[in-house]
Image (tube, rainbow, N blue to C red):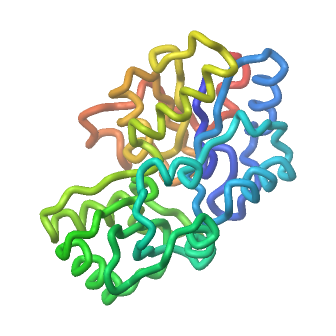
Amino acid sequence: MYFIDVQGTLISDIDKSPIQGSIEFIEKLNKKNIPYILITNNTKSSSEVFFEFLKKSGFEIKKENYIDPLMVLKDVVKEKNVSAYGSNEFLQNLQYMGYNLDFKNPKAVLIAIKKDFMPDEYADMIEAVLNGAKLVGMHETSIYAKNNKRYPGVGAILKMLSFATQKPYTVVGKPSELFFKKALELLKKQQSDADFDKITIISDDVVGDLIGAKKLGMKTVFVLSGKYKSADEIVPSLDIKPNRVLNSLKDMIDEI
């Protein structure tokens, strides 16, 4: 059984097209009735819109095969007044979900992916956290890849702000234990005896996804179809290493 990352694993970071072998990989899982969950860090689109996008891209998936941070956000952030940073679409999603955007006296600071963070935004985040607001990341991605460039991910920004304020932070999506447990609950609906030690997780983010998963007992597969050009860029410096390193999902099709 599998947890499968989406961006950089199933679809390209460049143009969101299916990566070679990814559609076939999902098709084979379906054909053999192998349980799996797509675990994405999507926050830009609503959960429903991104799920439909994946289906239209050729992935034959059902709603019980999918989870993203927006689907578990209310379990982590119960406060309604938040200052949020990310794409305009992310801010609109929050308002649709019932959150109030409050940049003067927020109870929580929510951070998602955004390419063009400004220094004054970081200053506002620091001020809010020092005044008692919770610091929350929608996920803990190490690197954000777009247009053939790599930017600091949400995880890197969280660590910077935590260092600046000496305050802890909470993560909604991967690799938080809560998110993985929610994904496991979905997997149990497909196979009742599912547990972390029976799951193989596949992702292009070894720091933001795989290390946390391995600590929970999952087997980890690091694919080089996304953020990293080679394993040498990241793996030698890790204390906890992935179980396997492959070029893409195409390398696993024959194993199923």
Residue that appears at 67% across and 64% down: 45
Which residue is situated farthest in the top direction here? Answer: 193
Q: Residue at x 67, y 21 (%)?
A: 189
Can you say whether 90 is above or below 247 in the image?
A: below
Query: Residue 186 in the image: x percent, y percent?
Result: 62, 29
Name the outermost residue toward the left: 166
* Residue sitting nearer the eye, 95 or 224: 95
Taking depth in this image into account, of 80 and 156 the one nearest to the observer is 80
Left or right of 107 on screen, residue 151: right
Residue at 47% x, 40% y: name it.
Answer: 179
Placement of the N terminus among the 4 image quadrants:
top right
- Where residue 174 appears, as percent x and y from the top left, is 46, 45
* Residue at far bottom of view: 120
Pick the front one: 191 or 142 = 191
Query: Is 21 or 205 nearer to us in this picture?
Result: 205
120 left or right, relative to 204? left
Residue 49: image quadrant is: bottom right
